[in-house]
Image (cartoon, grey):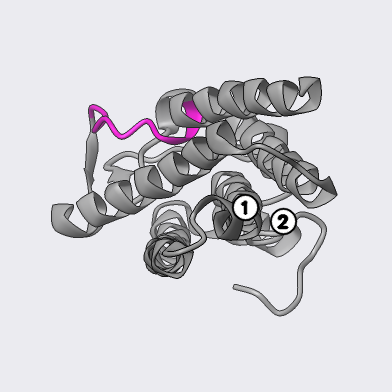
Amino acid sequence: MYEITAFKIISGLFTIFFIFFGMDIRKKTGARDFVSPVWQFIMKFSSFLLIGAFIWTAFQIQQISAIDWLSLLLTICGTTIVTMARTTLGKAHTFTGQCLEKPELVTQGVYRFTRNPLYFGVFLCEIGASLFVLHQAPNLYPHDYQYVLTGLAVALLYAVIFNVKMAIREANYLESHFGEAYRQYRSSVPFLIPFFKLGEK
Protein backbone atom coordinates (compact mmCIF):
# COMPACT_ATOMS: atom_id res chain seq x y z
CA MET A 1 0.00 0.00 0.00
CA TYR A 2 2.80 2.41 0.94
CA GLU A 3 4.62 1.48 -2.26
CA ILE A 4 1.60 2.40 -4.38
CA THR A 5 1.13 5.66 -2.47
CA ALA A 6 4.80 6.56 -3.00
CA PHE A 7 4.48 5.74 -6.70
CA LYS A 8 1.45 8.03 -7.04
CA ILE A 9 3.10 10.91 -5.19
CA ILE A 10 6.31 10.69 -7.24
CA SER A 11 4.32 10.42 -10.47
CA GLY A 12 2.27 13.48 -9.57
CA LEU A 13 5.29 15.58 -8.61
CA PHE A 14 7.23 14.82 -11.76
CA THR A 15 4.16 15.35 -13.92
CA ILE A 16 3.87 18.85 -12.45
CA PHE A 17 7.56 19.46 -13.18
CA PHE A 18 7.15 18.22 -16.74
CA ILE A 19 4.10 20.39 -17.41
CA PHE A 20 5.78 23.48 -15.97
CA PHE A 21 9.10 23.08 -17.79
CA GLY A 22 8.18 21.02 -20.85
CA MET A 23 4.68 22.23 -21.68
CA ASP A 24 5.15 26.00 -21.64
CA ILE A 25 2.85 26.60 -24.61
CA ARG A 26 2.76 30.39 -24.35
CA LYS A 27 3.97 32.22 -27.44
CA LYS A 28 7.01 34.23 -26.43
CA THR A 29 7.87 37.78 -27.46
CA GLY A 30 9.89 37.69 -30.66
CA ALA A 31 8.68 34.21 -31.63
CA ARG A 32 7.09 33.22 -34.90
CA ASP A 33 5.40 30.05 -36.15
CA PHE A 34 7.53 27.38 -37.75
CA VAL A 35 4.41 25.51 -38.82
CA SER A 36 0.71 26.24 -38.99
CA PRO A 37 -1.00 26.90 -35.63
CA VAL A 38 -3.36 24.02 -36.49
CA TRP A 39 -0.48 21.51 -36.42
CA GLN A 40 0.78 23.08 -33.21
CA PHE A 41 -2.69 22.72 -31.65
CA ILE A 42 -2.79 19.02 -32.58
CA MET A 43 0.66 18.64 -31.03
CA LYS A 44 -0.45 20.32 -27.81
CA PHE A 45 -3.62 18.20 -27.71
CA SER A 46 -1.60 15.00 -28.27
CA SER A 47 0.90 15.96 -25.56
CA PHE A 48 -1.74 16.72 -22.94
CA LEU A 49 -3.61 13.54 -23.89
CA LEU A 50 -0.49 11.47 -23.25
CA ILE A 51 0.27 13.30 -20.00
CA GLY A 52 -3.35 12.89 -18.89
CA ALA A 53 -3.34 9.18 -19.67
CA PHE A 54 -0.16 8.68 -17.65
CA ILE A 55 -1.29 10.53 -14.54
CA TRP A 56 -4.84 9.14 -14.68
CA THR A 57 -3.47 5.61 -14.89
CA ALA A 58 -0.99 6.31 -12.09
CA PHE A 59 -3.78 7.35 -9.74
CA GLN A 60 -5.99 4.38 -10.65
CA ILE A 61 -3.52 1.54 -10.15
CA GLN A 62 -4.06 -1.02 -7.42
CA GLN A 63 -0.81 -2.93 -7.89
CA ILE A 64 2.62 -2.17 -9.33
CA SER A 65 5.61 -4.16 -10.50
CA ALA A 66 9.23 -3.64 -11.49
CA ILE A 67 8.09 -2.65 -15.00
CA ASP A 68 6.08 0.23 -13.57
CA TRP A 69 9.04 1.47 -11.51
CA LEU A 70 11.27 1.24 -14.58
CA SER A 71 8.69 3.26 -16.51
CA LEU A 72 8.61 5.87 -13.76
CA LEU A 73 12.42 6.01 -13.71
CA LEU A 74 12.43 6.77 -17.44
CA THR A 75 9.91 9.58 -16.97
CA ILE A 76 11.95 10.97 -14.05
CA CYS A 77 15.13 10.94 -16.17
CA GLY A 78 13.28 12.56 -19.07
CA THR A 79 11.70 15.22 -16.86
CA THR A 80 15.07 16.00 -15.27
CA ILE A 81 16.67 16.50 -18.69
CA VAL A 82 13.75 18.66 -19.85
CA THR A 83 14.03 20.78 -16.69
CA MET A 84 17.78 21.23 -17.15
CA ALA A 85 17.37 22.14 -20.82
CA ARG A 86 14.54 24.57 -20.17
CA THR A 87 16.52 26.26 -17.39
CA THR A 88 19.59 26.55 -19.62
CA LEU A 89 17.59 28.04 -22.47
CA GLY A 90 15.89 30.66 -20.34
CA LYS A 91 14.40 33.34 -22.58
CA ALA A 92 15.65 31.49 -25.67
CA HIS A 93 13.00 28.80 -25.12
CA THR A 94 10.01 28.44 -27.45
CA PHE A 95 7.41 25.72 -27.70
CA THR A 96 8.01 23.18 -30.46
CA GLY A 97 6.62 24.48 -33.75
CA GLN A 98 7.79 28.02 -32.98
CA CYS A 99 11.13 29.79 -33.24
CA LEU A 100 12.67 33.11 -32.27
CA GLU A 101 13.14 35.67 -35.01
CA LYS A 102 16.51 36.42 -33.38
CA PRO A 103 17.64 33.03 -32.07
CA GLU A 104 20.46 32.33 -29.65
CA LEU A 105 23.00 29.55 -30.07
CA VAL A 106 22.98 27.80 -26.69
CA THR A 107 25.83 25.32 -26.24
CA GLN A 108 26.38 25.18 -22.48
CA GLY A 109 24.92 22.96 -19.77
CA VAL A 110 23.12 19.88 -21.03
CA TYR A 111 23.51 21.24 -24.57
CA ARG A 112 27.14 20.07 -24.43
CA PHE A 113 25.91 16.47 -24.66
CA THR A 114 23.00 16.69 -27.09
CA ARG A 115 21.82 19.43 -29.43
CA ASN A 116 18.21 18.61 -28.60
CA PRO A 117 17.94 17.81 -24.88
CA LEU A 118 14.33 18.99 -24.71
CA TYR A 119 13.28 16.52 -27.39
CA PHE A 120 15.46 13.77 -25.91
CA GLY A 121 13.92 14.31 -22.48
CA VAL A 122 10.41 14.33 -23.93
CA PHE A 123 11.12 11.08 -25.80
CA LEU A 124 12.27 9.42 -22.56
CA CYS A 125 9.07 10.59 -20.86
CA GLU A 126 6.97 9.30 -23.75
CA ILE A 127 8.69 5.90 -23.66
CA GLY A 128 8.28 5.63 -19.90
CA ALA A 129 4.67 6.77 -19.87
CA SER A 130 3.76 4.52 -22.81
CA LEU A 131 5.37 1.47 -21.21
CA PHE A 132 3.51 2.18 -17.96
CA VAL A 133 0.09 2.63 -19.58
CA LEU A 134 0.66 -0.35 -21.86
CA HIS A 135 1.39 -2.51 -18.83
CA GLN A 136 -1.48 -1.26 -16.67
CA ALA A 137 -4.26 -0.74 -19.24
CA PRO A 138 -5.33 -4.41 -19.53
CA ASN A 139 -5.94 -4.49 -15.76
CA LEU A 140 -7.69 -1.12 -15.50
CA TYR A 141 -9.72 -1.29 -18.74
CA PRO A 142 -10.15 -5.02 -19.44
CA HIS A 143 -12.99 -4.60 -21.95
CA ASP A 144 -11.84 -1.64 -24.00
CA TYR A 145 -8.14 -1.18 -23.31
CA GLN A 146 -7.36 -1.83 -26.99
CA TYR A 147 -9.28 1.33 -27.93
CA VAL A 148 -7.48 3.32 -25.25
CA LEU A 149 -4.10 2.09 -26.46
CA THR A 150 -4.97 2.75 -30.10
CA GLY A 151 -5.91 6.35 -29.36
CA LEU A 152 -2.76 6.91 -27.33
CA ALA A 153 -0.63 5.23 -30.02
CA VAL A 154 -1.95 7.68 -32.63
CA ALA A 155 -1.22 10.64 -30.34
CA LEU A 156 2.26 9.32 -29.56
CA LEU A 157 3.07 8.70 -33.23
CA TYR A 158 2.01 12.22 -34.15
CA ALA A 159 4.04 13.74 -31.29
CA VAL A 160 7.18 11.81 -32.21
CA ILE A 161 6.98 12.64 -35.93
CA PHE A 162 6.19 16.29 -35.19
CA ASN A 163 9.10 16.66 -32.78
CA VAL A 164 11.60 14.97 -35.09
CA LYS A 165 10.57 17.23 -37.96
CA MET A 166 10.81 20.31 -35.76
CA ALA A 167 14.26 19.30 -34.50
CA ILE A 168 15.50 19.01 -38.08
CA ARG A 169 13.92 22.35 -39.07
CA GLU A 170 15.41 24.03 -36.04
CA ALA A 171 18.86 22.68 -36.94
CA ASN A 172 18.59 24.11 -40.45
CA TYR A 173 17.28 27.40 -39.05
CA LEU A 174 20.18 27.73 -36.63
CA GLU A 175 22.68 26.88 -39.34
CA SER A 176 21.25 29.59 -41.57
CA HIS A 177 21.67 32.11 -38.75
CA PHE A 178 25.00 31.08 -37.24
CA GLY A 179 26.77 29.41 -40.16
CA GLU A 180 30.19 28.01 -39.27
CA ALA A 181 29.67 28.41 -35.52
CA TYR A 182 26.68 26.09 -35.66
CA ARG A 183 28.41 23.65 -38.02
CA GLN A 184 31.31 23.32 -35.57
CA TYR A 185 28.85 22.75 -32.74
CA ARG A 186 26.97 20.19 -34.82
CA SER A 187 30.17 18.34 -35.67
CA SER A 188 31.05 17.79 -32.01
CA VAL A 189 27.66 17.27 -30.31
CA PRO A 190 25.13 14.49 -31.15
CA PHE A 191 21.78 15.42 -32.68
CA LEU A 192 19.62 13.69 -30.06
CA ILE A 193 21.09 10.86 -27.98
CA PRO A 194 24.00 11.94 -25.75
CA PHE A 195 27.36 10.32 -26.63
CA PHE A 196 25.81 8.64 -29.68
CA LYS A 197 26.80 10.20 -32.97
CA LEU A 198 26.47 8.04 -36.05
CA GLY A 199 26.22 9.65 -39.46
CA GLU A 200 23.62 12.13 -38.28
CA LYS A 201 22.98 15.63 -39.53
- Spot the residue most to the bottom: 199
- Front residue of this view, candidates 57 and 46: 57
| Disc 1 crowd, CA 10 A, few/some/many (<14, 14-19, 20+) | many
Pointer 1 residue = 136
Give the mark, 1 or 2, whose residue is nearer the N terminus. Answer: 1
Which quarter of the figure has residue 20?
top left
Residue beneath the point at 49% across and 55% down: 141
Residue 155: in magenta span:
no
The residue beneath circle 2 is: 189
- Give the quarter of the image for residue 139: bottom right
The segment highlighted magenta reads: 21-29
* Quarter of the rendering containing residue 48: top left
Question: Marks 1 and 2: which is nearer the front?
Answer: 1
* Side of 194 where 191 appears, left or right: left
Amino acid bearing label 1: Gln
Image x and y of residue 137, in percent = 55, 56
Residue 112 is situated, as x and y percent measured from the top left of the image, at 73, 43
Q: Amino acid at mark 2?
A: Val
For the N terminus, give its image quadrant: top right
In what element is the residue under mark 2? loop
Magenta-drawn stretch contains 22 = yes
> Eyeballing the image, is 147 above or below 36?
below
Q: Is residue 105 visible?
A: no
Say whether residue 34 is left or right of residue 174.
Answer: left
C-alpha distance separating marks 1 and 2: 37 Å
Magenta-drawn stretch, dominant element (helix, strand or loop): loop
